[in-house]
């Protein structure tokens, strides 16, 4: 009995350790992100959105913008792409000297997780969709910030 339990535990650990990193074959699972997502519950006088377009079967381009009336407060260029047998979320923000690459570590039918432990903040980004609603959580160093969006028809 002990041998059976031990071998079962060993198999569970081996299986968990062999979780596969998403590849180009998984990229179509990200296509739901295409379109415009309007930020909900922004501060008074502020609006925001993320807009994504599909460039190919394995590449998407996006932009994230936060505005106060007609002034742009924050703008970032975004990409999703397959490269070297892995998938990446790439952010281009003025505050950083170059592109920031986050490896996509998990994909489900309704979301994805990407990580870059070497980045200051965020180190982890999670997109989670429910119907026409989107929750984006950025986290790292004990901090976590949620952003809520709604799909624009």
Image (tube, rainbow, N blue to C red):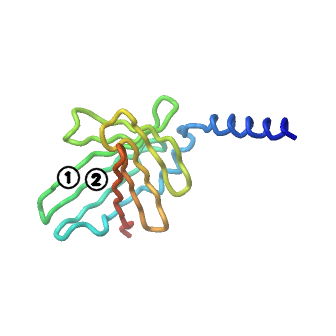
Image position of 146 with respect to 8: above or below: below
Furthest toward the front, the residue is: 2
Q: Which mark is residue 99?
A: none
| Badge 1: residue crowd in 10 Å (few <14, some 14–19, many ≥20) | few
Which of 55/125 is in front?
Answer: 125
Residue at the image point whose x is 34% and y is 60% from the top: 147
Residue 108 position, x and y percent, is 55, 52
Quick one: quadrant of the C terminus?
bottom left
Residue at the image point whose x is 43% and y is 51% from the top: 126
Image position of 12 with respect to 36: above or below: above
Image position of 64 with respect to 103: above or below: below
Residue 55 position, x and y percent, is 40, 45
Residue 101 position, x and y percent, is 36, 36
Which of the 4 image quadrants contains residue 41? bottom left
Marks 1/2 in contact by CB < 8 Å: the verdict is: yes
Q: Which residue is mark 2?
A: 64
Q: Helix or strand or loop: what does disc 1 sit on? A: strand
Say how many tags the image has. Answer: 2
Q: Helix or strand or loop: what does disc 2 sit on? A: strand
Q: Is residue 144 left or right of residue 128?
A: left
Q: Which mark is residue 74?
A: 1
Furthest toward the right, the residue is: 1
Residue at the image point whose x is 44% and y is 43% from the top: 114
Q: Mark 1 to mark 2: distance in Å? A: 8 Å
Which of 54/125 is in front?
Answer: 125
Which of the 4 image quadrants contains residue 1? top right
Query: Nearer the N terminus, badge 1 or badge 2?
Result: 2
Which of the 4 image quadrants contains residue 2? top right
| Badge 2: residue crowd in 10 Å (few <14, some 14–19, many ≥20) | many
Q: Is residue 134 left or right of residue 64?
A: right
Residue at the image point whose x is 41% and y is 62% from the top: 134
């Amino acid at each position: 009995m002990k041998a059976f339990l031990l071998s079962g535990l060993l198999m569970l650990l081996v299986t968990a350790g062999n979780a596969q990193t998403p590849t180009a074959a998984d990229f179509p699972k990200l296509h739901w992100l295409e379109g415009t997502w309007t930020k909900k519950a922004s501060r008074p006088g502020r609006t925001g959105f993320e807009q994504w377009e599909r460039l190919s079967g394995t590449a998407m381009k996006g932009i994230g913008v936060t505005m106060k009336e007609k002034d742009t407060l924050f703008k970032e260029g975004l990409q999703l792409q397959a490269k070297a047998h892995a998938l990446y979320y790439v952010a281009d923000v003025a505050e950083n000297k170059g592109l920031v690459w986050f490896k996509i570590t998990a994909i489900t039918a309704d979301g994805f997780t990407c990580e870059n432990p070497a980045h200051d903040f965020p180190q982890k980004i999670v997109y989670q969709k429910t119907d026409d609603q989107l929750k984006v959580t950025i986290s790292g160093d004990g901090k976590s910030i949620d952003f809520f969006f709604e799909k624009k028809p």
